[in-house]
Amino acid sequence: MKREYKLVLYALGAFMLGYIVLSADWIEFYTYLQVTPVKVIVLLLFYQCITKLLINIQWKSLASEVCGEVSFLDVVLANATGDIMDGLTPGVKMGGELGRIFALKSRADIDIADASIIVGLQKTFSLFSFLLLTLGSVTWFSLSFGGSDKYYLYIFTAAIAAFIVIFAALILFVLKPETIMGRLGRISRGSKTIIKIEESLKKYSQILRRLFSNKRLFCSQMLLGIFIWSFYAFKLHVLVKSYHIQMGFFSLAAITFLSYAMGMIPLLPGGMGSFESCMILLLKLSGISVEMGAAIAIVFRLVTFWFEFILSGLILILASVPAICRGDNDVKIQV
């Protein structure tokens, strides 16, 4: 069943990408790309730097909750490692999370269990925020376009149902991780690996409940997660506006979150192809040509993906310079 599900996702992603490649006028696309204001791209790159700063602040806050004081620089370097791995692995970016876990262990001397909890906590708040925004986005599109075409209504209704199920599963995991621990215990009683996983889940649950009980801290983490994701929508809004296109912020926010959701399909590394295809088709649904939509999607990904990938690489290289200057021949750029 899992294999058939993956094949359906691959086919969907390939179909969207193929449709765009065959239907677009690429000369017109290049023309739109050329008229993109350079000052807008520079502004968006600056906004992306702010986004990365906010993400690292969130990581630092959660790391301090798990294991006390952690260097902000170690958090930045661990995240840079994860960003590189995110860009090299398809779909939901599990490679990036593993990269962050091992980077926290090697750079900040945090044991694997605590590093896994830190990553799990950040992912929990990020997913909560993302699912809330995506559910709102799907509902928005369903109300905006579902009434005019039953086909779109069926798609958006199914998407809403899927996100409600995912959201409910996430809440169950957060509130009752013991259900997962019980299943793990039945799978392999007495296994050292299972015992370690159970201990990590218990600690994760305890810390999460402590965060829930601290309403100020919990709300600040949720609001920060929502703001970070909404900031991506704001960047798309600035970009679209630079082409003198009038579109509401909520419509563009919906397009942003749905495109990121589609980018989780493991078609190519970093969600490439599936993300761009979804954004182009949603922009087309909103009245923007395929060529203009392709230009917008490419520039947006240049800022939010490729720039971030390059910036992370530069951060890791610069972090290795002092050791190289000291003549340490064993130094490695850890990725």
Image (cartoon, grey):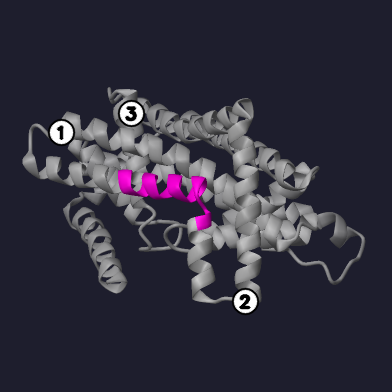
Residue linked to disc 2? 190
Q: Position of residue 237 (x, y in %)?
A: 38, 28
Residue linked to disc 3? 243
Q: Is residue 79 left or right of residue 22?
A: right
Q: Where are the magenta residues, as a range?
A: 164-178
Q: Secondary structure at mark 2?
A: loop
At label 3, the amino acid type is: Tyr
Residue linked to disc 1? 145
Q: Is residue 60 left or right of residue 271?
A: right
Q: Is residue 183 left or right of residue 150?
A: right
Q: Position of residue 60 (x, y in %)?
A: 70, 41
Q: Quadrant of residue 232?
A: top left
Asked if the magenta segment contains residue 165, the reply would be: yes
Give whichever of 209, 308 is nearer the camera. Answer: 209
Vertical side of 317 occupied by 171: above or below: above
- Residue at image position (33%, 55%) is 274
Q: Secondary structure at mark 3?
A: loop
Within 10 Å of the Cα at label 1, are there few (<14), some (14-19), or many (20+) other Cα atoms?
some
At label 2, the amino acid type is: Gly
Vertical side of 88 occupied by 254: above or below: above
Q: Position of residue 177 (x, y in %)?
A: 52, 53
Q: Quadrant of residue 81?
A: bottom right
Asked whether the beta carbons under mark 3 and mark 2 sit within 8 Å of each other, the answer is no
